[in-house]
Image (cartoon, helix red, strand yellow):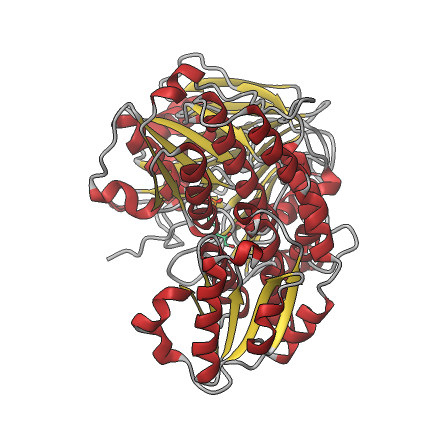
Amino acid sequence: MPVAYVDMCGIVGYVGGQDATEVIVEGLRRLEYRGYDSAGVAVIASDGVQSRKRAGKLANLEKALAESPLPETTVGIGHTRWATHGAPNDVNAHPHLSEDGRLAVIHNGIIENFAELRDQLSSGGVRFLSETDTEVAAHLLAVELRDSADLTEAMQRTCQQLRGAFTLVAASADDPDTLVGARRNSPLVVGLGEGETFLASDVSAFIAHTRSAMELGQDQVITITRDGVEITDFEGGPAKGEQFEVTWDASAAEKGGYDLFMLKEIAEQPKAVADTLLGRISEDNQLVLDGLTISDAELREIDKIVVAACGTAYHAGLVAKYAIEHWTRIPVEVELASEFRYRDPILNRQTLVVAISQSGETMDTLMAVRHAREQGSRVLSICNTQGSTIPRESDAALYTYAGPEIAVASTKAFLTQLVATQLFGMYLAQVRGNFFGDEIRGLVSDLASMPNKIDLVLDTMDPVRELARGLKDARSVLFLGRHVGYPVALEGALKLKELAYMHAEGFPAGELKHGPIALIEDGLPVICVMPSPKGRSVLHEKMISNLQEIRARGAFTIVIAEEGDEGVVPYANEIITVPAVPTLMQPLVTTVPLQVFACELATAKGHDVDQPRNLAKSVTVE
Ligand code: F6R
């Protein structure tokens, strides 16, 4: 049985006046976070298509190009791949060529009927070299091109035969000044430069050249030349893309003097939070959420909110539940998007589904959005990526302004998701009259002070780094929290798992005695996220009891506590202090040391922090 290869990859296409290979490799470098199992590039030269491709990271392809350069041309395509199964080898790397070598194709997504099409093509005499579904598209396109002699029409006909999710970009030696792309359920954006045009999985691939961009709609085919674009649907009927300006510049996607993107992105958090607040708080401290295209009347009708998200974004959703329920008294459920539609959730017009996604392309979240809308619910997406699919398919979008997040592990996007969900919660409370004006003003000015507080945390991270280095050989680390500290514990554990490849678990501290306390043994590092001691908080007292319980059993306790919290001193082996902030905003400061801890520990173990094994930034398969 053929093996299905699944990609959620980075795609770049270029037609212009510069050396295509150079532009494409530079674009792939910015997209490498999407997948780094292999990389390849193909250009149209005078004697046909020429390509180089290599398994492994982009550096391997660059080496191959240095040893055997491609001819200097101005049209080409490139790809960086993430494979779920099978060997990510040179042969399975993209681009894939037609049998006569005159056509090259790159692909992101899954062609679900590839086995059927492959059998059909094989019985017609086509010889396959790789095990990928992509090669089917290359051969199919070649067959259609023989019949129609027009690359755009051949692409339309090819797409009509494909099922599943795909972005395709093709280059043909018979049409050397043109590239043709297509998309269904998978991202493709266009960069419109001066005398040059780009196709890419996301705008980071071309922002060094142009900030003028266009997003394509579902089931569209695009033909690009250096001077413009033409868009049709899969049947050949006229279609339109939507133009937009990218608000961040190329330097935002560079390391800017840091050794790692993750370090840079951790450091950028005060700015990311400030940018997400910008323009959303009026002079008199009222909330203004421009772009929220759900009317106030509709917001007043909502009787339930369901947050759907994955991974770190799901943790932001868990924090949002505490804030939104507290402020609005609307019940909030938080769902892992991958589970959501499979359990027949109760949804109707009065349910607001909030989809949180940094990339805006996560397939699990997208499917949750579609399911919710099919059931008649309204969907608000909280997203960091302009032109991406999830906001486009939602009823309204609230953007976070973290800028490009390149490191695979999410940091600054998480903090901005916390801010955006809180802004939305406050807005909802404002619209529904749950708040008096001065309450809003108080909360808003608390939020506005968060960039400074995060800055203060960042200034005191040296002891955290030292602690992390000292624990590099630990077998396991536990994270405990209560209330909003619980999602923070989950987030701390997730960061450590994905970066340090270490066993880590986050628990609600009160749940320990119901089982997990059996894990505690002599010397086991346990990181505890303390609630504020202010007002002799019951939560703080309970957490102190939990600390005592684990200390009595030999745990090595690392306590993240508010400055001045003397109560924890007797029970902490190490204390990391953070500034005092309102309880619901605590995750904005308590998460930061956990990000730094995981980053440093993984670095001490010698891991590739920006590109951890087995992961990809944008998970566009279910
Ligand atoms: C963890 C991480 C992932 C993402 C998740 C959702 O550090 O980055 O868990 O949070 O894959 O991704 P988005 O937010 O793009 O939908």
Q: Which of these two is toward me, 342 or 548?
A: 548
**Residue 490, image x, y percentages:** 45, 59
Which of the pair 256/483 is nearer the observer?
483
Q: Is residue 40 visible?
A: no
Q: Camera-side residue: 113 or 31?
A: 31
Question: How many numbered callouts?
Answer: 0
The quadrant holding residue 570 is bottom right
Instruction: Give the image quarter of residue 209.
Output: top right
Residue at the (63%, 68%) spot, across then down? 566
Residue at 57% x, 45% y: name it.
413
**Residue at x 52%, y 25% (from the top left corner):** 436
- Name the residue located 38 percent from the left edge and 20 percent from the top edge: 300
Residue 495 makes an appearance in the image: yes
Q: Is residue 535 above or below residue 275?
A: below
Quadrant (top left/top right/bottom left/bottom right) for the N terminus: bottom left
**In the rendered view, would you say 301 is above or below 426?**
above
Residues 334 and 184: in front is 334
Residue most toward the bottom?
522
Residue 269: x percent and y percent?
66, 47
Q: Dividing the picture into quarters, in which one does residue 363 lie?
A: top left
| Residue positioned most to the left | 344
In the displayed orientation, state which residue is furthest to the right: 257
Q: Is residue 133 left or right of residue 617?
A: left
Instruction: Reply above or below: 408 against 148.
Output: below
On the image, the x and y values in percent for residue 275 come to 67, 35
Q: Position of residue 611 (x, y in %)?
A: 57, 59
Query: Residue placed farthest to the front in the image?
Result: 535
Residue 51 horizontal side relative to residue 553, left or right: right
